[in-house]
Image (tube, helix red, strand yellow):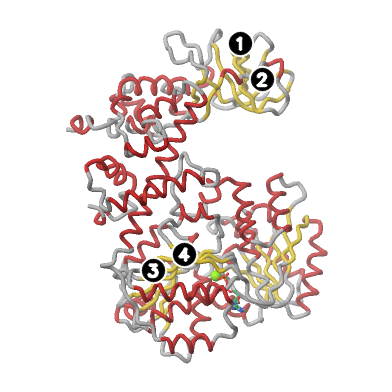
Amino acid sequence: MKNIRNREGVEDVPIQFVKTVGEKRAQALATVGVLTVEDLLEYRPRRYLDRSNVVPIARLKTDEEVTVTGEVIQVEQVRRGRQRLLVRIYDQTGILEGVWFHQITVFSRIFRVGMTVAFSGKVIRYKHWQIIHPDFDIIDQKQSPLHTGQIIPLYSSNETLRKVGFSSYGIRRLVHLALERYGPAVVETLPEPLLRKYGLLSRARAYQQMHFPESQSQLQQAFRRFKYEELFYWELLMALRRRHDHSPTQGIRLTIRNEVLKKMVQRLPFTLTGAQRRVLREIYQDLTKGPPMNRLLQGDVGSGKTVVALLTMVMAISAGYQAALMAPTEILAQQHYLSMKELLASFEIRVGLLMGSLKHSQKVTVQQAIRKGEVDLIIGTHALIQEQVEFHRLGLVVIDEQHRFGVLQRAELIEKGGGPHVLVMTATPIPRTLALTLYGDLDVSVIDEMPPGRRPVKTYWRTEERLPQIYEFIRERIRQGEQAYIVYPIIEESEKIDLKAATVAFQHLQAVFPEFRLALLHGRLKMEEKETIMYRFKAGEIQILISTTVIEVGVDVPNATLMLIEHAERFGLSQLHQLRGRVGRGRRQSYCILVTPSDINEVARQRMQAMEATTDGFKIAEEDLRLRGSGEFFGTRQHGMPDLRYADLVTDGKIIEAARKDAFALVETDPQLRRPEHASVRRQFLKKFADRFHMAHIA
Ligand code: ADP
Ligand code: MG
């Protein structure tokens, strides 16, 4: 049965079908996710050895990253002292040693005197030139024609793979076999006109050139094709989603009661900024037009997004619908609940709160009220997207700190209503191309103005020896009636050790500040405890809040003017900026003090300097991208990001825009991907995104 399908392409051909792969080897390949021939073709070389760039041993310099080739002249297992394997190679100009301390037996079986090998890595000088645990490759096995080219692909391997003969060299032979046998069956997944438009390599040729490039330029062409393909499909997902969300059959046209809105605006303790008003006008228009709103609200920390959310919800509620606000942490949800409840006190708007840590009976009560329409404004955490939650008449969904949620979670909440309007808010300011890629299915509004009277937070980076003076400074300010946060880097709330560190630090600080009221806040506290602490901090009763990063997002206490971050080197730049955003919310001068050990690494140093240099979230985000690269920047923080293996969101802006245009144009002409010439696009799309997109939309 399988064979019949296989004629269509290589995607489902089990890897065992490739010559030389038996059950055992197939199992080993599965450890790196290679189950089919296509997976193998997608197993992209980790790097390339370009023989024209190989460095002669005589010209090595300490600490350089290099590739060296040579003939193995000695393989020695050293048993005295620390056990190690030494593999000496000679290249006519000198001798270099590859050194292994681990898996000595496995590696010793790989090398034989007389082989030609390549070692890559950082060279050090310890009696001889050495590379510790080099990346290596065997490049002259006679029976194989694979190594005649200038550019040789090197593949990642692991212990399991090596045991079955799949070190880089073995994998290369396997890929070669697979390409020979199945290469011609690789199905094209991009429409012909687009290939022609940009002169892209066919998919079959691109695989060939990615693994066995004829030249550097062909290698670049192969990557250009895969980058484009990857971005094209991502944008196709965006285009189809948007098309679906905006289809005129869906959506709720709201009849907003302007007098309620006006009254609410008057009730606010401040006047709206110009930017807030402009954004609210955009939202108002969306809500009254009919098709569901799908809008991203960007604004730096402290720019006043919450009140925009509140007024948007009031619009929906005044039109007779329920509105839901989802926040990423319980602390933030509680804070929104308390402040909104207070502001709405004189309105006939019923506010409910739903979070995971409520008692079961409380949860059930709230869920019932939501179902029966007995609450209008529902604030909550992830708990809102659980199955038991059914809305009576959901008209609007607001998602705060969107970057903390996945695209899927957003979709789940939206599913709860019959095409509700959606507003997502984020403080991560990102360049336009990134916004397009990340939120390609959304319209974007920006709050680019801070509330009046704000003074930029003064930021100082100090080493730990200065803590006594810093504590004195804090003491001084608190005597003036201000409040402080002291943040400890608990990366994982579940890590007991970290929690203990924070607890010890708390006890220490109680001794440092015996005259003040301190409290310790962390994610593992019970909900009532967190609530009480936040309430007392807000009321000014607690003067110093020692906290983990649970306060990172959203917390709003304008009287807090001091932010001391210990071990600041452990935080990313955007996270530091978010933390700093907890102060500078009132009219008084605020301070952010970053404390690190004195011997931090260069990248951490640059982060501290960037924090001192600017309070502009946009600049911070750009710097963060520069320091980390987009992979990591989004990898840990932006769930629901495209899982990009080839393209780089920072440097491939041009390809992003082209792919976006093409994908949207294609959906415009063929919204269901029904045309025969799009059959392979459709198939590929469903294969990639079946779990992210409701097939019903195009099936
Ligand atoms: P964020 O955009 O980070 O979510 P918030 O909505 O928490 O920011 O607002 C930050 C602070 O600014 C809050 O204390 C809020 O009450 C206040 N604020 C919001 N808008 C205005 C305004 N137009 N004038 C004065 N203060 C404002
Ligand atoms: Mg906020």
Proximity of marks 1 and 2: CB atoms separated by less than 8 Å: no
Sequence order check, earlier mark of 2 and 4? 2
Sequence order check, earlier mark of 2 and 3? 2
Q: Which quadrant holds residue 144?
A: top left
**In the image, is residue 66 above or below residue 31?**
above
- Compute the Cα span from label 4 to label 1: 63 Å
Judge by depth and name the residue closer to the eye, 387 or 441: 441
Assess disc 4: are there few (<14), some (14-19) or many (≥20) residues with their C-alpha within 10 Å of its C-alpha. Answer: many
Proximity of marks 2 and 3: CB atoms separated by less than 8 Å: no
Q: Nearer the viewer, mark 2 or mark 4?
A: 4
Image quadrant of ligand 1? bottom right
Query: Tag on residue 74?
Result: 1
**In the image, is residue 397 above or below residue 235?**
below
Proximity of marks 1 and 3: CB atoms separated by less than 8 Å: no
- In which quadrant is the N terminus drawn? top left
Inspect the image, locate mark 4, and give the three-letter code of the amino acid beneath it.
Leu
User: Which residue position is annotated with label 4?
Assistant: 296
Inspect the image, locate mark 2, and give the three-letter code of the amino acid beneath it.
Arg
Circle 4 sits in a helix, a strand or a loop, which is it?
Answer: strand
Circle 2 sits in a helix, a strand or a loop, which is it?
Answer: loop
User: Which residue position is annotated with label 3?
Assistant: 293
Tell me which residue sits at (76%, 72%) in the image: 513
Inspect the image, locate mark 1, and give the three-letter code of the amino acid beneath it.
Gln
Proximity of marks 2 and 4: CB atoms separated by less than 8 Å: no
Assess disc 3: are there few (<14), some (14-19) or many (≥20) residues with their C-alpha within 10 Å of its C-alpha. Answer: many
- Compute the Cα span from label 2 to label 4: 64 Å
Proximity of marks 4 and 3: CB atoms separated by less than 8 Å: no
User: Which residue position is annotated with label 2?
Assistant: 80
Q: Nearer the viewer, mark 2 or mark 3?
A: 3
